Amino acid sequence: MAEFETPAIITADPQANTTDLLVERVKLTPDLALFAVPEGEGWRDISASDFLNQVVALAKGFAAAGIETGDKVGFIARTTYEWSLVDFALFFAGAVMVPIYETSSPAQISWILSDSGAVACICESTDHEERLREVLPELPEVRTTWAMHRGDLATLAAQGVEVTDEEIERRRTTAVGADIATLIYTSGSTGRPKGCVLTHSNFVELSRNSAAALAEVVAEPGASTLLFITTAHVFARFISILNIHAGVKTGHQPDTKQLLPALGSFQPTYLLAVPRVFEKVYNSAEQKAEAGGKGKIFRAAAHVAIEHSKYVQEGRRIPLGMALKFRLFDKLVYSKLRTAMGGRVKYAVSGSAPLGERLGHFFHSLGVTILEGYGLTETTAPATVNLATKSKIGTVGPALPGVGVRIADDGEIEVRGINVFKEYWRNPEATAAAFDGDWFKTGDVGRFDADGLLRITGRKKEILVTAGGKNVAPAALEDPMRAAPIIGQVVVVGDQKPFISALVTLDPEMLPTWLANNGLPADMSLEQAAADSTVNAEVQRAVDRANAFVSRAESVRKFTILPTEWTEASGHLTPKLSIKRNVILSDFEDEIEAMYAVPVNTTNVSLA
């Protein structure tokens, strides 16, 4: 059983809670810009001391409104400055936030609020409020609701003026490290969401150790980041708290369609993103170049970038011809992409799904080192992450300080340490099933390389076993296929079947540009595109590229392009855009069976 454990860098403080991170930051750098909010065409800074004052004022409002220490409070909102304000105000009031994805359905909202025992709920918009009100009659414990769009945060702060500083100090210091800090519900890709009890020590010790391990990223002068993935997810939530501890200026952009203009004006030094974002940046640049008649130049530049990065990572001498091409393409292509991302990005932290080595090498040559990491809600986000000082593209890095990772005999990744959650809320059976002693069983499968860096090879429950007995990890095929600009999502199937097949959806954002670039009507519907021979040929090329990485027995032999899109609204994606495999297999059972109705021939075949 392979095992790697990294000793903690920072001595643990079992009495500390998450509020101490902000208090310590204000003592160290009261005038440091800790946040920036949009104002006109630019951004207005908010200092650490100003943020603390706003937090305390809102905490007093919660106290005046009857929120008691230990009360659970639901929160539905997009990724904005107010998210962190409410988060820390609830911490200071001694309450426990229960975040809810802004895209959650009324049924999901009802389940999370009822299961958590929430006594109040805050929502941001009219839409959020309507969904909440729809289920309030079945939530007798929820006695109070507030709506940010109606100015309720300002009203709360005004109502709290009579609450003393001493009362808030008492409340904020009541919790110790072992106490619950937040209750985050899993995204529910395999069933009803479970509440993960994350403690104050999970956030405090992980923030302090991660800041030390990632000093090159978060401790450089003027460090800043623009958050755009949902803060209801543990990934962005942890980073937002880490930034407060480390003194990183944080901006927010909830509308990803406005991401590029926001990056240009905010100019962050590091980014937090999921792989799909990097795929979109690359694919958009490629299709834009294609539309301008420079597609061949872009593809040549991408090839040189990837090969150049491989030489650098392996410590090999760069051939003169490659070096000259690299300099030329840096002026023609790479510099423009750097500018599009704000011009100052040095690092990007990627998680939630495998990135793929091609993109990692491409962005590395742009001067952006993507630090791919791995973790779950149950591990307070990161368990492993590539470091500026110890990084290898294609891995998710070493265990963070204070964290141990081991590979069980069946290949399952298990984690223990400062980041592992306490328990599943009101679910002792699930808690017991999730642990082997103090090791949390992640359900993911992986292996270590010779340097102790972790590679993820798939989900334990998603491993397919063909009728011929061949074990196939879907991610090894799905990730390379999704890299194609035209493809939205992929689900590989073939469990107990004679060969491997794939369900494919098209990307409605990229499709019009791709169609126009290939001489087809840009307004073609998804149904029309799914049946088009040119589109099918492009998907076939993506299948062929993916098959090049696996054996014949593991290769995709047939595929079907679906005339529809998988979204969270359709019930096929989680809020963090992970596929709900079980739901897809059920909903598209007929399409799957059709691929196996006719024996496979020697080549891949589309059944669109």
Image (tube, rainbow, N blue to C red):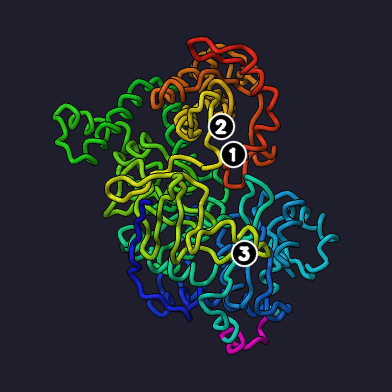
Mark closer to the chain start, 1 or 2: 2
Residue shown at 51% from the left, 33% from the top: 474
Q: Nearer the viewer, residue 309 or 160?
A: 309
Residue shown at 68% from the left, 74% from the top: 71
Q: Nearer the viewer, residue 545 or 557?
A: 557
Name the residue beneath numbered marker 1: 579
Name the residue beneath numbered marker 3: 183
Q: Outermost residue, right direction?
A: 137
In the image, residue 78 lies in the stretch drawn in magenta: no
* Residue 95 x/y as whole percent: 64, 74
Name the residue beneath numbered marker 2: 489
Mark closer to the chain start, 3 or 2: 3
Secondary structure, mark 2, is strand
Residue shown at 64% from the left, 80% from the top: 60
Q: Quadrant of the C terminus?
A: top right
Q: Which mark is residue 412?
A: none
Do the numbered discs 1 and 2 sit on residues whose CB atoms are within 8 Å? yes
Secondary structure, mark 3, is strand
Per the rendered image, the range of residues in magenta is: 160-169
Amino acid type at circle 2 is Gln
